[in-house]
Image (cartoon, grey):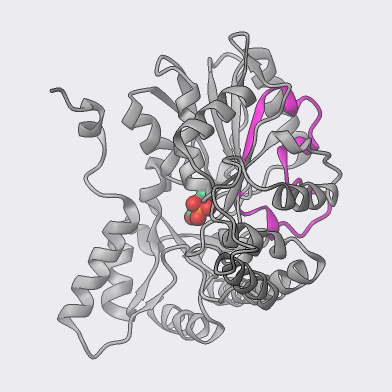
Amino acid sequence: MKINENYRSLETSYLFSQVAAKKAAYQAAHPDQRILSLGIGDVTRPLPTPVVQAFTEAVLDQGDPSRFHGYGPEQGYDFLKESIQQYYRRFGVELPIDDLFISDGAKCDLGNILDLFDTDNTVLIPDPVYPVYRDTNQMAGRRIAYLPAGPENGFLPMPDPDQKADIIYLCSPNNPTGAVYTKAQLAEWVDYANKQGAVILFDAAYEAFVTSPELPHSIYEIEGARECAIEVCSLSKTAGFTGTRCGYTVVPQELIRGGLSLRAMWLRRQTTKFNGVSYPVQRAAAAAFSDEGMAACQEVLSIYRSNARLMHEALEQAGIWHTGGIHSPYLWMKCPHGLSSWEFFDQLLEKAQVIGTPGCGFGTNGEGFFRLTAFGTPEDTAEAMERIRKFL
Ligand code: PLP
């Protein structure tokens, strides 16, 4: 037999496993020290109360013969899809219900959607960005061209009309930099993709952190996007679903490539390889989109936002160049004294017992930068920033 040789081109371990391994090794060597983590982008607040109530009730349904649910629709229950439809109306987007596909999270959808595309395609990936885009395409052996992002373009690379592209990843608000595309900038991407016959994979995992009414939450706020864009989103960071697992993907009816409907292809793929998200999780997710649920989620987000403000102030006081943290839970800082990302990581762990994420893990342009997350508890965030301030 032959293995998938493309796996040889991957770095040996996924970024966050590397961070976790370093943390574990340091803790084992210094068992009395308390390490504070502003590293991995996991949330710390539990599921909001209305979500827990709906979840609990649905679990009880599963134990009652008259309310029990077996296999559901692979693409998700209408009750959840309707609540997502309703949510999109808040920013003026009308989604046909059949465009929506419920899943167990954005990461799986981002990997699985590639089933629809040949390996003989050129993929455009911003650098730095969420490493899953790069790794999933490397696994399939696709050609990758990177879109350099840096302070000079506000970490928001724009299309080059002479560059050929088939699949384009956009992540806004961006992980790790926190940069957000304006509607005008997204319109340029949509125009470019339509001219090229390319498909945009738009990752909106952090859309709920957008606070300015002028900034887009969804690529479908842009005219022409239904002809070229797939949107992937998640309840992980907005409703605390990192351990509960629920996300969704929008594949518009109008998206046709090679004479085939990508929506029909995705439905075919999901009904063949996926058996749906559990009924209680979908009930819990629908509760997150109710008025009560949304208000409870916003309360949690305001805790993370206030952490981000505190982090910004501490970095400002220390005179460290940084960006993000406004429409995003991530602050993106320049490593001091010209240190590399991993050098700064090691020093911060050794001297301040604080964990962050080395920017180089998000791409070569992330070298020399560092990501801090606002998902910690307010107490740990305050203590971590005090330690960072002293160390700097
Ligand atoms: N997309 C981005 C940009 C992310 O940062 C993350 C998680 O950190 C995901 C997707 C994955 O989300 P999920 O938990 O729904 O798989």
Q: Is residue 376 left or right of residue 217?
A: left
Q: Is residue 176 visible?
A: no
Q: Looking at this rendering, what residue extends furthest in the bottom direction?
A: 32
Q: Looking at this rendering, what residue extends furthest in the left direction?
A: 1
Task: Say which quarter of the image contains residue 93.
Answer: top right
Q: Is residue 52 above or below residue 211?
A: below
Q: Position of residue 303 (x, y in %)?
A: 64, 77
Q: Is residue 206 left or right of residue 14?
A: right
Over which residues does the magenta segment extend? Answer: 205-233
Q: Looking at this rendering, what residue extends furthest in the top direction?
A: 259
Picture residue at 58% right of the left edge, 30% below the top: 267
Q: Is residue 194 left or right of residue 307?
A: right
Magenta stretch: includes residue 8: no
Q: Position of residue 141 (x, y in %)?
A: 33, 24
In the foreground, 378 or 333: 378
In the foreground, 174 or 92: 92
Magenta stretch: includes residue 211: yes
Q: Which quarter of the image is occupied by the C terminus?
A: bottom left
Picture residue at 43% right of the left edge, 78% below the top: 388
Q: Is residue 380 above or below residue 372?
A: below
Q: Is residue 206 left or right of residue 383?
A: right
Q: Position of residue 264 (x, y in %)?
A: 62, 23
Q: Position of residue 290 (x, y in %)?
A: 78, 64
Q: Is residue 2 above or below residue 139?
A: above
Task: Say which quarter of the image contains residue 323.
Answer: bottom right
Q: Is residue 339 above or below residue 232?
A: below
Picture residue at 79% right of the left edge, 33% below the top: 222
Q: Which quarter of the image is occupied by the N terminus?
A: top left
Picture residue at 64% right of the left edge, 26% below the top: 263
Q: Is residue 65 visible?
A: yes
In the foreground, 324 or 60: 60
